[in-house]
Image: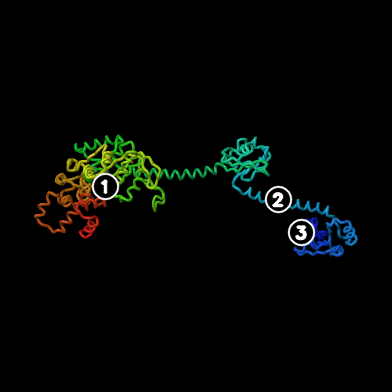
Amino acid sequence: MARKVKVGIIGAGRGGSSIYKTLRGIEHVEIAVVCDKSLDAPGIKMAQADGIYTCQTIAEFCQTDGLDLMIEATGVKEVQAEIEQLKLPSTSVMEAKSANLMMHVIEEKEKLSEMKRLKGELDAILNSVQEAIEVAGNDGTIKYVNPSFTRVTGLSATQRIGQNIFEVSPNGALARALRTHDQIFAHRSRVGGSEAEVISNASPIAVEGRMEGAVVVFQPLTDIYKLMEQLQASNQVIDDLQTRINQISTSAYTFDDIIGSHPEFEKALDLARKASRSNSTVLITGESGTGKELFAHAIHSASQRWDKPFIKVNCAAIPETLLESEFFGYEKGAFTGAGKTKLGKMELAHGGTIFLDEIGDMNLYLQAKLLRVVQDMEFERVGGTQTIKVNVRVIAATNRNLREMVKKGDFREDLYYRLNVVELHLPPLRKHKEDIPAYAQSLIVKFNRKFGKKVAGLSAQAEQLLMNYTWPGNVRELQNVMERAMVTVEEDMITNRHILNLVDTPISKLGREFEELIPLDEMEKRMIRIALNRYGESVEGKKKAAQALNISLATLYNKLKTLR
Ligand SMILES: Nc1ncnc2c1ncn2[C@@H]1O[C@H](COP(=O)(O)OP(=O)(O)OP(=O)(O)O)[C@@H](O)[C@H]1O
Ligand SMILES: [Mg+2]
């Protein structure tokens, strides 16, 4: 390290102390002594506080060892003369005037290095940002571009700097900001001289209230495109899911799946075909197992809405408290647990068909709400205020006598008439027994496939047996009977043997069996068997079986456990 310049200051008033302050901050300078005849002089105080030697006489000042430079800041002629006499020849003397000038130079240099430091910092920032930056003066001359500018546009700094923005990018945000003296946001343009499409923000640069130019910050559209592509991909996933939901809920059966050609049955079929061509509300009535749901599907499939959702709501299976939100959906936060907005069946069915199964089991409060939907096709989500409009075709079904329910006040009359625009009554199987062989044959084909069997058909006697039965459970019961027969059959014909124990005891024969007297638990077993044959083994079926036997569902389950 270079040796420090040893300096002494004489005169610690205003001039001397300001010199003292400047020199104190310079690395290569060592202030060895500060002298003033008054110990109260501000420079003396400072020096003392800094632990620097001070004195009061010129003689003492001049005796300081090895001073390279004395700064004379008293401005007093006599002092100057005395110093000249007493100082060592090797020590130079500088007057306050020259010293001040020197201080000025030093300060400027300091400022310059501070600015260099700031510029260094600024450069580091501008070089590291991902956004492209370009600066131009008031006349449009481009003064600066950062490395991202080159990355985005392919134009180097040397190519760009010095050009005029009004010539190279007259429609860009930077030129606009210069022209309008205003900020420009989200401006989309092409960078002049390059292919890059960008989104920019530009702003005037003001120095002490005067506009000195403008700066633009921009990003290539490709980066934004990438984000948009990602968004599109996500939207695609949503669309696909939507389509799949539609496929899943879209109706599975058509009129081709419906068997039956008896005139009684044909009437119903004709009416259903006609109804499928209109948008009218259809009320399908008929005993359990007569094909109400099948018909609802077929009507939808044959309608113009066939490729839109078919949404089924089982009004009997949903707890009353949930029915409303099932139907109309709910808004986020509508109640505890409503974490996000959920679409109701009504909204899901938009464009398609809603099938209101077991409509006779819906409570009066919801009937009122449903009436409004059926009439105006609008509703609000639970906890929501926005009115939602939908276009939905309504098909309702029930095995209850709605007309009777209306009379008793259990079903709203206005809703009944709304739903009953087309009443499609499906005849019980016993009214079109002639169709039984056709049903049986199609079931044999179906179960052959299911069980891997090769049954050819029914024996004449077996067919007769089926024809003689009253089928209170209608086609569903026939399906169950045939399925059991097909499980047990080992030959290629279904005969009485496979059906006999299955059809069990037609009600008409009960009398004779009573005469024969059988154990009560055996009787119970048979009755349960009959009920399950009739209604099927599904939960729904068991519910109905329990109802028919006048026991609770729980009791039925218990009996099934012990009786099996
Ligand atoms: N005409 C028919 N042709 C073919 N299959 C039928 C016919 N009618 C009913 N089925 C079949 O019988 C079963 C019962 O029909 P579906 O579920 O439509 O009856 P439902 O009237 O809705 O009965 P429930 O009132 O008990 O709900 C279904 O598997 C259905 O496919
Ligand atoms: Mg049904």
Q: Amino acid at mark 3?
A: Arg
Which residue has dot 3 on it? Answer: 24
Q: In the rendering, at what x and y percent does residue 110 appear?
A: 74, 53
| Label 1: few (<14), some (14–19) or many (≥20) C-alpha neighbours in 10 Å | some
Task: Determine the image quadrant of residue 423.
Answer: top left
Position of residue 366 measured from the top left corner of the image (x, y, whole percent): 31, 46
Disc on res. 495: none
Name the one closer to the observer, 169 or 420: 420
Q: Which secondary structure lies at badge 2? A: helix
For residue 11, side relative to residue 149 (left or right): right
Identify the mark nearer the N-term, 1 or 2.
2
Give the number of the mark in front: 1 or 2. 1
With 502 as the anchor, is 353 left or right in this view? right
The quadrant holding residue 553 is bottom left
**How many tags in the picture?**
3
Q: Between disc 2 and disc 3, whose residue precedes?
A: 3
Q: Quadrant of the C terminus?
A: bottom left
Provide the residue designation for mark 2: 116
Disc 2, disc 3: CB below 8 Å?
no
User: How many residues crowd around disc 2 within 10 Å: few (fewer than 14), some, or many (20 or more)?
Assistant: few
Distance, label 1 to label 2, CA atoms, is: 85 Å
Q: Amino acid at mark 1?
A: Asp
Q: Quadrant of the N terminus?
A: bottom right
Amino acid marked by disc 2: Lys
Q: Which residue is mark 1?
A: 361
